[in-house]
């Protein structure tokens, strides 16, 4: 059997908490993030705890293997809120002894000062949004921190947390492969076992999209993007951090358990504005999504104990498509055992043989006793490979 980067364990049971507030809105970002002058932290704490109670009633008896505070900017939460959420999660479900508890943080100096308080609250893994080590690029990305502050935050984080990850964005307008390669080598001197490295995407509804439509932003062409991507894969693999997912790289055993649960279609509860979940409720697999607007979510929770906007059963082809769309992002691909768990069927029963054959002939996929995964050439054109399998 191949050495797995993502460990062949059960996909686990995860809890996701969305903190929707940021200091400023970055021009590239389409996450559910909002800028507010005042946040009533006590109300928000109570509402998050109430929604946890609500989901716990539907998922009794599970053991939480990961808890993830995402955003927005969760490092703007009061550490007291983080502690209360961790404590309540452990009281409502049981907590695995090695549960991963991650918090996303922005590396401004004010937030760095509070990292020690998040550790005391129970967080054991930090994910820092460094984005770039170049001040000019950080200004272009609308970030509120300098490269120096980001490196100081990485040092502080490494002193406090056993597990630290950081995010970088590349394929910026005009970025040359040699400049990115130099930056990536520099970034590697700070790595602590996990890095998320994203190509800049122009998302609808963002300020960058407006500028892009006006012709003010030109992204690297397809060939340049591919060269940047391939250089990234090679450098990080050689450094001992191969990709375990399209944009996520880790040393063996350091993959983010929370990510693995969601990409392997394990069960997860999503709490907070705009959060999504996949869980077995009343014997059925349901996809949940919460009201996105922070104030509307808060008043729904105050009224009815939860801010669920939709809770829809997910079955058949929709479930198959979702499992392949997410699972093929993983280097380990979609496991037969996960398809059996969710759908009670195997790869060959779910995908037409002629579709599998043409992608096997083109050497874009591998199908074996473990499951189905892409080759490096297949990963480079993941969207078209997935479309060819599923359409
Ligand atoms: C929810 S955000 C991060 C949390 C934190 N607020 C921050 O900004 O550091 C998760 C990550 O997604 C990445 N990201 C967000 N929008 C992106 C885009 N349009 N293109 C590429 N990466 C993006 C960034 O690297 C970001 O750190
Ligand atoms: S990238 Fe992070 S800090 Fe910037 S708007 Fe999005 S969530 Fe907020």
Image (cartoon, helix red, strand yellow):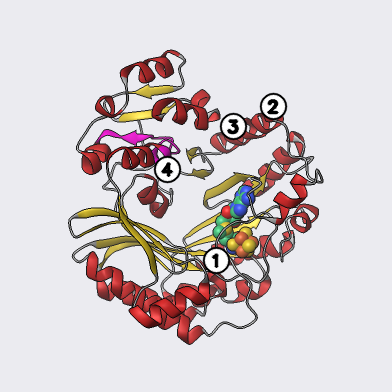
In the image, residue 327 lies in the stretch drawn in magenta: yes
CA gap between label 2 and label 3 equals 16 Å
Mark 1 crowdedness (10 Å alpha carbons): few <14, some 14-19, many ≥20: few
Alpha carbons under labels 2 and 1: distance apart: 40 Å
Q: Would you say the residues marked 3 and 4 are in contact, meaning their CB atoms lie under 8 Å apart? A: no
| Image quarter (top left, top right, bottom left or bottom right) of the C terminus | top left
Residue at mark 1: C-beta within 8 A of ligand 1: no
The magenta segment is: 325-336
| Residue 190 appears in the rendering | no
Q: Position of residue 244 (x, y in %)?
A: 45, 40
Neighbourhood count class around disc 2 (C-alpha, 10 Å): few under 14, some 14–19, many 20 upward: few
How would you rate the neighbour count of disc 4 (Cα within 10 Å): few for under 14, some for 14-19, many for 20 or more? Answer: some
Observer-nearest residue: 144 or 164?
144
Instruction: Tell me the residue that label 1 is attached to.
Output: 159
Mark closest to the chain's N terminus, 2 or 1? 1
**N-terminal label among 1 and 3:** 1
Going from N to C along the chain, the mark reached first, 2 or 3, is: 2
Name the residue beneath numbered marker 2. 223
Q: Provide the residue designation for mark 4.
A: 252
In this rendering, the label closer to the viewer, 2 or 4: 2
Q: CA distance from mark 1 to mark 3?
A: 29 Å
3D distance between C-alphas at marks 3 and 4: 16 Å
Whether 95 is drawn above or below 315: the answer is below
Residue nearer the viewer, 164 or 246: 246
């Amino acid at each position: 059997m191949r050495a797995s980067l993502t460990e062949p364990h059960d996909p686990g049971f995860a809890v996701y908490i969305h903190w929707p507030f940021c200091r400023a809105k970055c021009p590239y970002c389409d996450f559910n993030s909002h800028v507010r002058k005042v946040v009533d932290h006590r109300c928000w704490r109570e509402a998050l705890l109430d929604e946890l109670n609500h989901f716990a009633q539907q998922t009794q008896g599970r053991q939480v293997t990961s808890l993830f505070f995402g955003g927005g900017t969760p490092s703007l939460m009061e550490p007291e809120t983080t502690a209360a959420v961790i404590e309540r999660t452990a009281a409502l479900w049981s907590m695995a002894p090695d549960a991963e508890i991650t918090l996303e943080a922005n590396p401004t100096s004010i937030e760095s000062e509070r990292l020690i308080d998040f550790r005391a609250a129970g967080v054991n893994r930090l994910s820092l949004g460094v984005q770039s080590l170049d001040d000019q690029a950080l200004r272009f990305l609308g970030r509120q921190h300098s490269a120096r502050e980001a490196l100081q935050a990485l040092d502080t984080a490494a002193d406090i947390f056993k597990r630290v990850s950081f995010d970088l964005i590349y394929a910026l307008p005009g970025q040359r492969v040699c400049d990115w390669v130099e930056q990536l080598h520099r970034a590697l001197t700070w790595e602590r076992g996990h890095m998320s490295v994203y190509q800049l995407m122009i998302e609808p509804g963002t300020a960058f999209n407006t500028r892009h439509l006006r012709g003010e932003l030109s992204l690297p062409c397809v060939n340049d993007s591919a060269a940047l991507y391939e250089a990234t894969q090679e450098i990080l693999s050689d450094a001992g951090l191969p990709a375990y997912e399209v944009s996520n790289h880790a040393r063996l055993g350091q993959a983010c358990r929370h990510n693995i649960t969601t990409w392997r279609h394990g069960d997860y509860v999503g709490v907070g504005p705009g959060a999504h979940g996949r869980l077995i409720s009343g014997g059925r697999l349901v996809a949940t999504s919460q009201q996105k607007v922070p104030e509307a979510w808060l008043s729904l929770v105050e009224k009815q104990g939860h801010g669920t906007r939709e809770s829809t059963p997910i079955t058949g082809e929709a479930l198959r498509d979702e499992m392949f769309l997410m699972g093929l992002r993983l280097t380990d691909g979609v496991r037969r055992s996960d398809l059996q768990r969710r759908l009670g069927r195997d790869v060959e029963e779910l995908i037409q043989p002629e579709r599998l054959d043409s992608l096997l002939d083109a050497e874009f996929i591998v199908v074996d006793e473990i499951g189905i995964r892409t080759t490096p050439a297949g990963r480079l054109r993941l969207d078209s490979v997935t479309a060819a399998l599923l359409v």
